[in-house]
Amino acid sequence: MSAPVHPQEPGKTPKPVVDDSELKTSVSKPEPLLSRIWAQSEGKVGLVLTGLVIALAVVGYFFAEQITGRSTTEFIGLPFTDIGVFGTDNLGRSVLSRFVAGGLILLVTAFLATVLGMVVGTIIGMIAGYAGGKVDSVLMRLNDVILAFPQLIFAMLAIVIFGPSATVLVLVIGLTHAPRIARVARAATMSVTNEDYIRAAQMYSVPHWRILIQEIAPNITGPLAVEAGLRLTYSIGSIASLSFLGLGIQPPAADWGLMINENRIALSLQPWGVLLPVAAVAVLTIGTNMLADATARATATTATPPKRGRNQTIDPERVPKHEPIRHNG
């Protein structure tokens, strides 16, 4: 269907225009975030890789014995032999069974640690960026003190004091993420604090907590979503590293980080006990990193330009005039 044109005047070429409803839709209704991520090749690969590892971890945890025919604690032969598909581990248990069942604990603890760090760090950063002055200085200096300690060393110290457990892992990793997230949230908050809708809400004496939740938080979700993807990647690496050092998930639980530690002594004889969990962690890390990059690009695009034909142009006289957005307190 051809685009509408204005009546032709003598000596002027008719100008095709884009329908007002199409332009309004393209400006006011951007595509959903997931669609914008999927539209990128990097986003597709990241979603596929991450989804495959998550599916393996969830299905394997509940159905490892049905899938492999062996339980994670069953002794099927001598240590480091070729019995079964991928052989046996250091105690003669099935490597395949323990690998299939060993991912969910790592993913759940990493996810919970990331959520804890995002919540605590976002609250601190938003308060610091919005309040400014002495409040900002005190909170950021405390952040700097925590950032001065290497994350892994701080986690090892806390685990030695309180003992290794999933709860301690979540708390330690999450709280060590919080200062880094707070800096991102503070910068994002300061970038919108002087906007007109914030000043209007303050003028009408809207409570500060409502301004933070209803006005500021929805406008800083882009950088926070990117930071959440990065923190999830770091959580996976940190928890796997602690399990490798014997300070994370404890035997006889099946865990990818623990498997690397248990089977590294015979890497040349039976490499699958190390290679399988290393490959899974690597694929998951690559997938989440690619998702974070795709999310960063997707959040920078909030509207899709109107589709038009080869010879179609937009008439400036027909572009609808939009009223400024007013935020109610």
Image (spheres, helix red, strand yellow):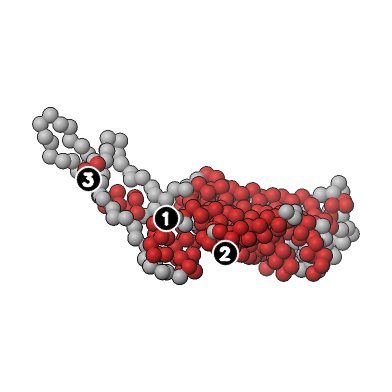
Q: Please name the residue that numbered disc 2 is placed on.
A: 123
Indicate the position of residue 151 as horizontal and vertical percent values: 73, 56
Mark 2 lies on a secondary structure that is helix
The quadrant in which residue 234 appears is bottom right
Q: Look at the image and tell me whether residue 11 can be seen.
A: yes
Q: Which mark is residue 195?
A: 1
Marked residue nearer the N-terminal end (1 or 2): 2
Task: Tell me the amino acid under the disc marked 3.
Answer: Arg
Q: Residues within 10 Å of mark 1 (few under 14, many from 20)?
A: few
Indicate the position of residue 80 as horizontal and vertical percent values: 87, 55
The residue under the point 25% across, 49% down is 320
Left or right for 324, reference 81: left
Left or right for 177, reference 328: right
Mark in front: 1 vs 3: 1
Marked residue nearer the N-terminal end (2 or 3): 2
The residue under the point 41% across, 60% down is 199
The residue under the point 27% across, 35% down is 311
Q: Residues within 10 Å of mark 2 (few under 14, many from 20)?
A: some
Indicate the position of residue 323 as horizontal and vertical percent values: 29, 55
Q: Where is the N terminus found, in terms of image quarters?
A: top left
The quadrant in which residue 202 appears is bottom left
Q: Please name the residue that numbered disc 3 is placed on.
A: 318
Q: Look at the image and tell me whether residue 59 can be seen.
A: no
